[in-house]
Image (cartoon, rainbow, N blue to C red):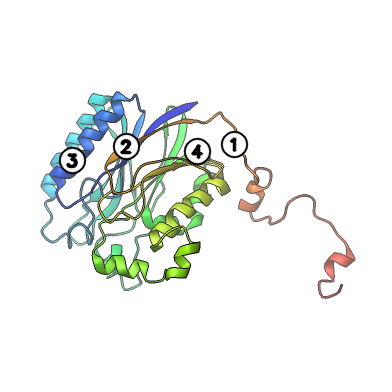
Amino acid sequence: MKLKIATSQFPVGESIGDNFENIQNQISDAAKMDCNVIHFPECSLSGYAGVDFPDFKAFDWSTLREYSLKVLEIAKENNIWVILGSSHKLTESNKPHNSLYIINNYGEIVDRYDKLFCAGDNTYKSNDLAHFSSGNHFSVFEIRGIKCSVQICHDYRYPELYRELKKQDVQIIFHSYHAGNMNTDRQNAMETPFNSELKKINFGKTYPEQTMPTTMVSYAGNNYLWISCSNTSKKESCWASFVVRPDGIIKDSLEKNKAGILISELDFEKEYYDSTKFWRERAINGVFFSGEKIKDSKSEKRTEL
């Protein structure tokens, strides 16, 4: 079983119309390359509240709906699945969801995933939680017989989510990010912990650049699944969109701060290195050792040589 995917990046911004133009063009390009699915960044159509624009107070929800319907039409016209980042309006008393619409190649929404762990503290007034309501469900779906799921940005900090999806036999996770468009103050705050010495021995110069790609690599290898990571390319983008193999090796990557789509053909029948294949299920079920359990008095006496 194979799946040809397009992992997107473009400069997500405040203008829904500009975002749509990028989305439309990239869907067309992906379809011409015979891709089965295209994967967009977090809030790729609506823009990201609190970063690309201050808040939802003057947000044009009717325009977002208009362009969302156009994306459905384009998916159908191009016979391609679309994983679309956007904001989903709730009733007036509740903040919107930060969502991914799962759109099939017939232009139908087959599910909507709402970010489970919106970043912020327990006052609900900082970061994501100042603008969004958290979700309450996983989304698992199939494309060409491949079991898929999705996650959004800060969800990456919770390995339990990936373990749960592995238990559901998910084979690929499309993880959408918005790690970019940082103003100078935010950029400085993200770089401050990395002094000159630390920069020499770490992979990145900001928290997102250091932790997000490395976590995706470890999750892919630990759970033996594919991961597509889509990010905004708007400066300053922390890292470029990439795809990780089930053995924890980055297969493909784009260039940072430059719009484009990454085309990857994934072969789900090919076997990759998997050091934990024999004992992973045991660990997931709470049995924390490999091999046979022994009974030995010298083993039990742990304070003696």
Labels 1 and 2: the sequence-earlier one: 2
The residue located at (22%, 54%) in the rendering is 90
Task: Report the mark closest to the observer, 3 or 1.
Answer: 1
What is the CA distance from the residue labelled 4 to the residue labelled 3? Answer: 29 Å
Q: Which residue is mark 2?
A: 261
Task: Indicate which disc, 4 or 2, sits on the residue closer to the N terminus.
Answer: 4
Image quadrant where residue 274 sits: top right
Image coordinates of residue 26 in percent, x first then y, are 25, 34
Q: Please report whichever mark, 3 or 1, sits nearer to the chain's N-terminal start.
A: 3
Closer-to-camera residue (189/78): 189
Q: CA distance from mark 4 to mark 2?
A: 21 Å
Q: Residues at badges 4 and 1 in contact (C-beta under 8 Å)? A: no
Amino acid type at image mark 4: Gln
Q: Residues within 10 Å of mark 4 (few under 14, many from 20)?
A: many
Circles 4 and 3: CB distance less than 8 Å? no
Q: Amino acid at mark 1?
A: Tyr
Q: Nearer the viewer, mark 4 or mark 2?
A: 2
Residue bearing mark 1 = 272
Q: Report x, y in % for residue 270.
A: 57, 30
Per the image, the residue denoted by label 4 is 171
- Lower position in the chain sequence, tag 4 or tag 1: 4
Q: Are marks 3 and 2 in contact (CB under 8 Å)?
A: no
- Evaluate whether residue 86 shows in this view: yes
From the viewer's perspective, is 62 left or right of 39? left
Q: CA distance from mark 3 to mark 1?
A: 37 Å
Q: CA distance from mark 3 to mark 2?
A: 15 Å
| 201 in relation to 71, above or below | below
Q: Name the residue: 33% across, 58% down.
A: 134
In this rendering, the label closer to the viewer, 3 or 2: 2
Q: Quadrant of the C terminus?
A: bottom right
